[in-house]
Amino acid sequence: MGDLSVLPAKRFASKRQDVWSLINEAAAASPIQPLVNMGQGFFGYNPPDFIRDAAKVAIDRLDCNQYAPTKGRPRLKEALSSMYSPHWGRKLDPNSEITITTGANEGMPILGNLEPSSVANQFHLKGMLSVFMSFIEQGDEVIIFEPYFDQYLENIRMPGGVIKCVPLHPPARGDSETCSSSEWTLDIADFEAAITPRTKMVVINTPHNPIGKIFSREELQKIGDICVQRRIMILSDEVYDSLDYVPFTRIATLSPEIQRLTLTVGSAGKHFFCTGWRVGWVIGPAELIDYVAFAHTKICYCTPSPLQEGAAVAYEQSLTNGFWSQTKAEMRAKMDRFCEVFKELGIPYTDPEGGYFVLANLAKVKLPADYVFPEHVKNRRRDFKLAWFLIMELGVAAIPPTEFYTPEHEHLGEQYMRFAVCKNDDVLDMAKERLRGLKAYI
Ligand SMILES: Cc1ncc(COP(=O)(O)O)c(C=O)c1O
């Protein structure tokens, strides 16, 4: 028989091990078990009863066990309209301005996955949508800010997009003092310099993963104004919007012009502690949403129906049952509880304005000179070595953020380590107890 080996697509063939599998494998190999896993941003606890019950009820319903409407179940879109219309200052049309996706992740890439001609055949194209159409051409550029949510990369590359990175500058005193995430700054001149005639889109993430930064109104206004001037579309990833510890601005609401260019992505998984449900959504101008919904139909047809219904009930009830304020207060309390250990140890951190990640700055931690790291860690930046060391010596897993940078800017993140605090308090306490072991290395 001849050679039956099958080659993967070139874009994946040379892929180095990603941070998630590297950290998970290291965690499994750690001599300290059970490991405290503060790496990936999954919740260590269940959604409240009213949310789980809603999904259980839905699964008994005939209409919920078949394909959902491709743009999403009407009840969910109506619930999202009720929730978000006050922010937009007008009634969002649930039928034309909101579409449901399979997690926020699916909401993001779909913009780039269409053949222009196939869309053109489906819709009467005009105005901004025509600008969109050119976005998906091979070689079109998308600007993202570093550090970025790593999922963006392949999502942009798959349709042939070219990534242009603009770094957020860490606070100069970040190695020695605790700073606010607002001190990670965007130099608007860097953003303008990254724009070329081929720039089709900028991706904004606020509240930001991993920094916890909430982009200020002024920053967003500047970005938005430039995008309007240069006709650049905005994808605003706001999946952590319920965890805002300072005033939060949504770029889509800054002006009608910015709104026409903006698609806002959100996640029921992040809102309701059920990332496994894979229910996300996109809000935007009707003609752009049509386009998104069409792509969604081609990618996966529709999003799991009973979980959409569960999410719909969750959004409806959360409008009046105090869920949002409780969630925010509880998450902030978890953040404060966990960060006590850094205060004790004199380890500076970036105090997040939003979300559930905290970046600790471990510049003060001295790794033993003779410590033996495996090959695949030895060649990476210092944060990978720190992550390995924490897993193997202290039994705590966290994420090295240089994974979220291009090689050119990796040095900006190599002293930091990302911890997810969306865990039970006893887990946070165990992590703190173990991290006290760092004292010996400071
Ligand atoms: C910034 C950001 N955007 C999007 C997502 C994905 O959200 P979902 O689970 O709804 O796909 C995540 C998940 O970690 C994230 O951190």
Image (cartoon, helix red, strand yellow):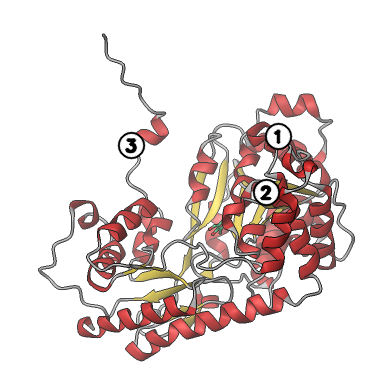
Left or right? Give the position of 181 relative to 312.
Answer: left
Residue 354 spot, x, y in % from top left = 59, 73
On residue 232, the disc is 2
Label 1 amino acid? Thr
Disc 2 from disc 3: Cα separation: 32 Å
**Mark 1 and 2 residues: CB-CB less than 8 Å, in contact?**
no
- In terms of sequence position, does the residue under pointer 2 or pointer 3 come before the other? 3
Residue 207 spot, x, y in % from top left = 60, 68
Is residue 248 placed above or below 166 in the rendered structure? below
Whether residue 245 is visible to the viewer of this picture, yes or no, is no
Q: Which residue is mark 1?
A: 297
> Foreground mark, 2 or 3?
3
Q: Which residue is mark 3?
A: 14
For the point 83% across and 36% down, which residue is it? 126
Disc 3 from disc 1: Cα separation: 31 Å
For the point 36% across and 63% down, which residue is it? 400
In front here: 145 or 37?
A: 37
- The single residue placed furthest to the left in the displayed view is 370
Mark 3 is surrounded, within 10 Å at the Cα level, by few (under 14), some (14 to 19) or many (20 or more) other residues, namely few
- In terms of sequence position, does the residue under pointer 1 or pointer 2 come before the other? 2
Label 2 amino acid? Ile
Mark 1 is surrounded, within 10 Å at the Cα level, by few (under 14), some (14 to 19) or many (20 or more) other residues, namely some
Disc 1 from disc 2: Cα separation: 25 Å
> Foreground mark, 1 or 2?
1
For the point 40% across and 63% down, which residue is it? 401
Q: Secondary structure at mark 1?
A: helix
Is residue 417 placed above or below 104 in the rendered structure? below
